[in-house]
Structure formats: C-alpha cells, structure tokens
Image: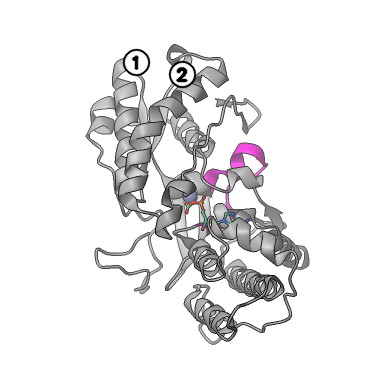
Amino acid sequence: MRRESGGGCRILSDEVWTDYDDHAAYGGVVPEIAARSHVERLDLTIEKAVHASGLSFNDIDAIAATAGPGLVGGVMVGLTTAKAICLAHSKPLIAINHLEGHALSARMTEAAGFPYLLLLISGGHTQLIWVAGLGDYRRLGTTIDDAAGEAFDKTAKLLGLGQPGGPRIEAAAANGDADRYDFPKPLQRRSGCDFSFSGLKTAVREATQSMTAPSEANIADIAASFQYAAARHLTQRTERAMAMAPADEATPRLVVAGGVAANGVIRSILSSLCERSGWTLIAPPAKYCTDNGAMIAWAGAERLAANLAPPMDEALALAPRARWPLAPPPEGAAIGGGRKGPKA
Ligand code: KG4
Ligand code: ZN
C-alpha cells in the first residue's frame, strides 16, 4: 500500500487466504493445522501480493507483520517470514499488534481522525476503547466471557450452519423473524460497558434443543432473534461507553471494526444509535472488517510515518506473542482472565 499525502492510502494489492475448509471436519479451528497452512501458503500469498502490486521488494519502504495476539503457530510463521524478508532486503520491520490493525483499519479508507471511540468486535475480542491517537489507547469495556464473533460461530455450529459462523447466521437470519424469540438482555444491572455473550449462547441452545428436528424456518427465526439480541447488546453497551468517553467535540466519532463489524444488522442498529446521539458512525468496508493484510500494512505505514519503526536488531529480537493487550484495563478491573493472564 502507498500512503496518500491528503490522508488514507492506495491499496496496491490485497491477498487474503482463508483455510476454513481445512478445519471443517474437526468442528473448529485446529491450531496445528492453522500453523501448517501458514507454512504451506504464506510464501505463495506474499509472491502474489508483490506481483499484483506491480512493485518489487526494492520499491518497498518497510515490512509490517502481526506479532500477536493469536494462535502462536501462525503468528510465528508470519513474523519469521517477515524477519527473513527484512534481512534479505535490508528493510525496516514493524511488528504490529493485530488489534491495532483493526483499531486503525477505518483510517485506511474513511476520514477517521483521532480521537474516536472504537467498538472492536472480532472472533477473539469484544472491546470498547478510547483511541486518543496512534499507540494511545484506553480500554473502557471488554467481554467477561465469550467474544461477539465466538458467539456467532458457536450459534452457527449449534444450528448446523457451518463456518464462518457470522456470515452464515446473517444469511440465515435474512429469512427469519427476529421477534420470534425474546433472548436475554445481558448485564442489565451491571454498571459500565462490559459485555457478556454466554447467557445468550445458552438461551439459543435451549431454544434449539426444545425441537427434535428444527426446520429451516425455525433455524432462520433462531438466527434472526440471536443476531438481533447480539446487536442490541453491543449497541446498549456502546451507548454507555459514549457517556464514559472523554469526547469533547460537537460531533464525536464512533468507529466499528473487526470481523463482526461486517454484519449489516449490527451496522444499522449502531447507525440509529449514532443518529439519535449526535455521533458520526465510521465503519470500514466489510472486506476490511474481517482479517486482512492491508490493515496490518496500514498500521505499519502509520507507525513508519510517526518514526516508530524500531532499529533492525530490536525488530529481529522480537518474539511472537499469544497474548498482547492493546490497552491497559481501567483501574480496578479484574476481568478478561485466563490461566496465563488476560487474553487481551
Ligand atoms: O476480525 P476477524 O476476521 O478475525 C479475528 O480477529 O477474530 O473476525 C472473525 C469473526 C468470526 O467470528 C466471524 O464469524 C465474524 O468475525 N464475522 C461476522 C460476520 N463476518 C465475520 N459476524 C457477524 N456477521 C458477519 N457478517
Ligand atoms: Zn482480527
């Protein structure tokens, strides 16, 4: 990608390789298979991207690669490959936090000036973050159990819709009645803007298991009711974060990013919230909501322009990280746990 002088950038090539089919037989993502497909496909994918851009490695100013958080096998393959390219071509290496890639993704194509409130909704994370500037992030809320995308994926599995769950639920829901089931409204009595999706998941399971063989119409109704309940929960917590955010402009900005932000119903309910609250909603095109290399390149370009590219020896010493929080939790918050500490 090439940064434009007036802001934003020109994406010269954008290759995305997905491997859902490799995991389909196992009912979920298998870390070893994911790592192996990175080894098998990454060099070819990079070659295609460089070829499609019309450039050669010599024309490139710097290489950006994800260094975490995520399944560490894949991250390791990507980061090691980037280190090898940087060494071979004497280019700076910029290690990017995957969540920062999502956090800045809207700035690639939209006028999303700092500061803004970010609703980051992906397969592994659900967070509300105040983005004050590049590298200056403050977490306002996070999920206390499942991530939003995880809830979509688990619901799709329960309904026999396959993966990736989000788009399959959205497609099934298009023919369903969102009012048929009144699924729970999580965390109604809890202050702040944290999220919870596990109660919703249980309610969907109970509704599904109450039928011996749910018809296509029943599945569509459950999908639509679940999608609406998830969108309503995301929107209600975002409304709370708007009140907590240090926004002092006449028309503050809400940016939504991450795979789940591709969802049309969620975008439209967030858009109504912004309309009635006097905020501007900014959402990247759906293809830059779900994981893509362009957003990592963009985060790298932003860091390079801000002179934040580390010296080569420091960059080469960087290890991949399975866990890497983007923003510190608010004082006193003790959630987002895990055996080895908070996931993000
Ligand atoms: O950001 P992403 O591509 O990868 C992670 O960083 O996790 O997000 C993937 C998640 C998956 O859970 C997927 O089901 C969900 O985003 N997703 C959607 C939609 N498209 C992708 N969820 C709801 N509606 C969609 N249209
Ligand atoms: Zn992602």
Query: Which stretch appears magenta?
Result: 103-122
Amino acid type, label 2: Ile
Residue at 39% across / 35% down in the picture? Answer: 65
Residue wearing tag 1: 89
Binning the other alpha carbons within 10 Å of mark 2 as few (below 14), some (14 to 19) or many (20 upward) gives: some
Residue at 33% across / 22% down in the picture? Answer: 86
Q: Can residue 207 be seen?
A: yes
Name above or below for residue 97 compared with residue 261: above
The image quadrant of residue 254 is bottom right
Residue at 58% across / 59% down in the picture? Answer: 166
Q: Earlier in the sequence, mark 2 or mark 1?
A: 2
Binning the other alpha carbons within 10 Å of mark 1 as few (below 14), some (14 to 19) or many (20 upward) gives: few
Name above or below for residue 133 compared with residue 215: above
Estimate the x, y position of residue 135 in percent, counting from the top left.
Answer: 44, 46
Disc 1 C-beta below 8 A from ligand 2? no
Q: Nearer the viewer, residue 126 or 18?
A: 18
Residue wearing tag 2: 60
Question: Does 117 lie within the magenta span?
Answer: yes
Name above or below for residue 329 compared with residue 47: below
Amino acid type, label 1: His
Estimate the x, y position of residue 21 in percent, counting from the top left.
Answer: 48, 47
Q: Can residue 308 be seen?
A: no
Q: Quadrant of the N terminus?
A: top right
Q: Is residue 50 left or right of residue 233?
A: left
